[in-house]
Structures are given as structure tokens and as C-alpha cells.
Image: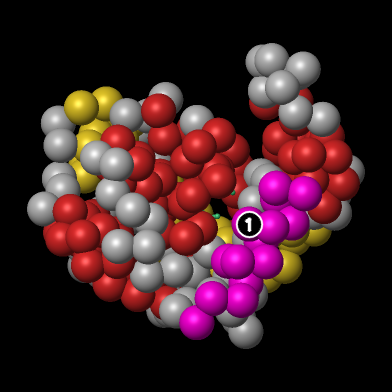
């Protein structure tokens, strides 16, 4: 039997991880948060005080890292880092780590290994183009940059730290790096279904996905 992958790509704050989690639950697939893998390596690099420009050292430490998903939590070298990888310092640095082709290769392999014996829903930037080019179905989620910034702002418990405008600028900056890097940039795959989530709630987006899945004959 061949296992199925469902790819969900798109820019920061488009709602990928929320809908990917819900969709995977509804259809009984395993959820893979590929961004969490890049974030975990970024956390390790920063914790060890490695210079962000020291590519060789970053690759060496990434190769020697053990990264696992257990019940939707992410473990780095045996420690649950699900909370730590969401820190601002990670948001600011992750796209630089994600530019390194060798790091991308390591992370592609982790995802393919998980998907070898499981049906998976995977969200990220290069899933439909590079990681699972023959995915069963591919979605590309977008939303206006103002809406994406608003969603991120609402996720912050401390609303005084950043203004919506600050968050909007961070998102624009990260999307620019992600879209313009040489190694598997953020890009809609030719055969991906585009869903603009502006003004749509989570359930509406998931329904739209389920409809498209059913149009393909279901899972
Ligand atoms: O949740 P959010 O959209 O903020 O980001 P994420 O999915 O956790 O991804 C964090 C960063 O990892 C992205 O901005 C990319 O730089 C990188 N990434 C990537 O290059 N390729 C992926 N498949 C997933 C994430």
C-alpha cells in the first residue's frame, strides 16, 4: 500500500498550521509541522551561541541533532521544545537557517522518513514543490498581509510588546527571505489549489479542503 501526503504551503500567518492540525484530525492523518523542524535547529544554534554565519558549524550540529515529533510535541535531543521554538528570537532568525541547502536536505529527509509508513498532512513552504512533489493533493494558503499580521497579533498574550505594524513588517521581511532564497523558495506548486483565507474562518477553510479532497475521489 502506498501512503498519502497532503501538502499545505503558504506565507507566514496564512493559517496553515491551524487548518493542517484540524484537517489531519478529521481525516485521521498524522500532522507534520515542517516549520517546527527548522525552528528546532534554530533554537539549538542560538542556545549553543553558534554564529549565524558559521554555516559549517550549524550543519555539523544539525547533523548531530535528534529531532522527533511525539503526540504533536517536538523534541530536540530528548527535550520537549514545543514552547521555546515559538519565541521571538526564533521568529527573527529561522529564515536565515532555512536558507542553508544542507539544512533543508536534513529536514526533507526527516519528513520523508515519517511519511514512509503513515498518511500525513504536512505544512510548510516547499512541501508541494520539493518535499512531496507527488503529494495526493496540494493546497496553497494565502491571506492579505494585514489579515495575517492581525492574526499573529491576536496570538500574542502580551499586546504591548509589538504593534500590529511591527508584526506586519516582521512578516513582510520573513516572506521576502523565504520567497527569494535559492534553495526551494516559498512558491505555489503548479498543481496546488489556491485558497485565499482572507475573511474566512478555520472551519470554512477546512471545509473547502475536504470538498477538494472529495472531488479527487476522497482519501
Ligand atoms: O508558522 P509560521 O508561518 O510563522 O512559520 P513556520 O511554518 O513555523 O516556519 C518558520 C520558518 O521556517 C519559515 O519562515 C521559513 O523560513 C522556514 N520554513 C521553510 O523554509 N520551509 C518549510 N517547509 C517550513 C518552514
| Left or right position of 100 against 193 | left
Question: Could you say which is closer to the camera, residue 127 or residue 30?
Answer: 127
Horizontal side of 78 relative to 74 (left or right) equals left
Observer-nearest residue: 65 or 55?
A: 55
Secondary element at tag 1: helix
Q: Is residue 144 left or right of residue 55?
A: right
Q: Which residues are magenta?
A: 169-182
Q: How is the image coloured?
A: secondary structure
Q: Is residue 147 visible?
A: no
Residue ID at (55%, 59%): 8
Quarter of the rendering containing residue 164: top right
Identify which residue is drawn at 62% across, 84% down.
190
**Magenta stretch holds residue 32:** no
* Image quarter (top left, top right, bottom left or bottom right) of the C terminus: bottom left
User: In this view of the protein, can residue 44 be seen by the observer?
Assistant: yes
Q: Residue at x 70, y 48 (%)?
A: 170
Determine the residue positioned at 22% across, 67% down: 56
Question: Residue at the left extreme?
Answer: 64
Query: Where does label 1 land, which residue?
Result: 174
Dominant secondary structure of the magenta stretch?
helix
Please tell me whether residue 83 is drawn above or below residue 9 in the rendered image: above
Q: Residue 44's image quarter?
A: top left
Q: Residues within 10 Å of mark 1 (few under 14, many from 20)?
A: some
**Residue 174 belongs to the span the image colors magenta:** yes
Of 184 and 210, the residue lying toward us: 184
Image x and y of residue 149, in percent = 78, 41
**Residue 122: % across, % down:** 44, 55
Residue 187 percent across, percent down from the top left: 61, 75
What percent of the width, then of the height, locates residue 184? 47, 77
For residue 140, what is the image quadrant? bottom right
Q: Is mark 1 within 8 Å of ligand 1?
A: yes
Q: Quadrant of the N terminus?
A: bottom left
Amino acid at each position: 500500500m502506498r501512503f498519502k501526503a497532503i501538502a499545505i504551503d503558504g506565507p507566514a500567518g496564512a493559517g496553515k498550521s491551524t487548518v493542517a492540525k484540524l484537517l489531519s484530525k478529521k481525516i485521521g492523518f498524522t500532522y507534520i509541522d515542517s516549520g517546527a523542524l527548522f525552528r528546532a535547529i534554530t533554537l539549538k544554534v542560538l542556545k549553543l551561541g553558534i554564529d549565524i554565519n558559521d554555516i559549517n558549524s550549524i550543519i555539523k550540529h544539525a547533523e548531530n541533532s535528534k529531532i522527533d515529533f511525539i503526540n504533536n510535541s517536538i523534541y530536540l535531543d530528548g527535550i520537549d521544545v514545543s514552547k521555546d521554538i515559538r519565541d521571538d528570537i526564533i521568529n527573527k532568525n529561522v529564515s536565515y537557517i532555512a536558507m542553508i541547502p544542507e539544512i533543508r536536505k536534513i529536514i526533507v529527509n526527516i519528513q520523508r522518513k515519517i511519511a514512509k509508513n503513515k498518511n500525513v498532512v504536512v505544512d510548510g513552504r516547499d512541501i508541494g514543490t520539493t518535499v512531496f512533489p507527488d503529494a495526493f493533493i496540494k493546497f496553497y494558503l494565502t491571506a492579505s498581509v494585514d489579515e495575517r499580521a492581525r492574526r499573529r497579533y491576536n496570538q500574542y498574550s502580551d499586546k504591548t510588546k509589538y504593534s500590529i505594524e511591527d508584526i506586519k513588517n516582521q512578516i513582510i521581511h520573513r516572506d521576502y527571505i523565504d520567497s527569494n532564497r535559492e534553495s526551494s523558495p516559498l512558491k505555489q506548486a503548479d498543481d496546488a489549489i489556491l485558497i485565499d483565507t482572507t475573511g474566512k474562518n478555520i472551519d470554512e477553510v477546512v471545509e473547502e479542503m475536504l470538498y477538494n479532497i472529495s472531488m479527487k475521489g476522497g482519501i
